[in-house]
Image (cartoon, grey):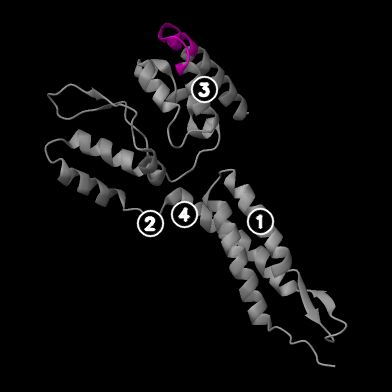
Amino acid sequence: MAELPQTRPVADIFAGAGMGLLLGTVVGLTTTPVVAGIVGALTSLLAVFLGLDGSGSAEGRAIRINALRIGSLGLAAVAGFGLGLYIRINNPLAEPPGVQMARWSEAFPDDPTLAKQMMVFERTGIEPGALIFGKDAPAEPVAATVNATVAAAKSSILYSTLSEFDACHRLNPERLNNTEQTLANYARANAPDSLPKIKVSIEALPPGEQAAALAVAHDILCILQEGEGK
């Protein structure tokens, strides 16, 4: 009876480490609920990919656990998780702050304040409350109409909770003192899924009642955000 071919230890380690590094890096890079679905799907595939090797005769098809492959998967997953966290937090692929600032300073040589604002927005996604176009010009309030695709591409972290989005601060009606702009922030590209639904409900109210409803919604969101942090 023919013997089933045995895999080499180096190949087992390489296969397990490669999949573990992929899994760990994906988990470390993002905190969105999508990760749970990805990890679940990968785990199901790993049961077939890693778990069982055939050994012995072709007829008997004896089964054994491949310890090398599973062990290398676990170790590489831990290393990949650390790598993903490092990339997500430090964003090493981005331009150095000095180079980025020099680029914006060249674009606005006569307006250093605006150059700084644009550099911070591009790097962090933090939107200034107003844009200052010159030392003698009044500040212009920022309209929350940033293209959703651009905002998502610039964001290095995908927010999934009220505390990560900082809803209590971003959605404070007193910050912009403008009901329309505040409601627009409820539908930002990186906002939690529940906020656009609140926006639609408030916009369905008569215009005279929207400001009061917005204030109540903000108070509730602050309470929920505070509860998440505990």
Q: Main secondary structure of the magenta part?
A: helix
Structural crowding at the residue carrying mark 3, measured as other residues with C-alpha within 10 Å and reported as few (<14), some (14–19) or many (≥20): some
Q: Which mark is residue 93?
A: 2
- The residue type indicated by label 3 comes to Ile
The answer to whether the residues at label 2 and label 4 have Cβ atoms under 8 Å apart is yes
In this rendering, the label closer to the viewer, 4 or 3: 3
The answer to which of 63 and 174 lies nearer the viewer is 63
* Sequence order check, earlier mark of 3 and 1: 1
Q: Residue at x 35, y 19 (%)?
A: 176
Q: What is the C-alpha distance between the residues marked 4 and 3?
A: 33 Å
Residue under label 4, please give it.
Answer: 87
Q: Indicate which disc residue 41 carries.
A: 1
Q: Picture quarter containing residue 135?
A: top left
> Upstream in the sequence, badge 4 or badge 3?
4
64 up-or-down from 121: above or below: below
Sooner in the amino-acid sequence: mark 2 or mark 4: 4
Q: Spatial distance from mark 2 to mark 3, Cα to Cα?
A: 36 Å
Looking at the image, residue 149 lies above or below residue 187: below
The Cα atoms of the two marked residues, 2 and 4, are separated by: 8 Å
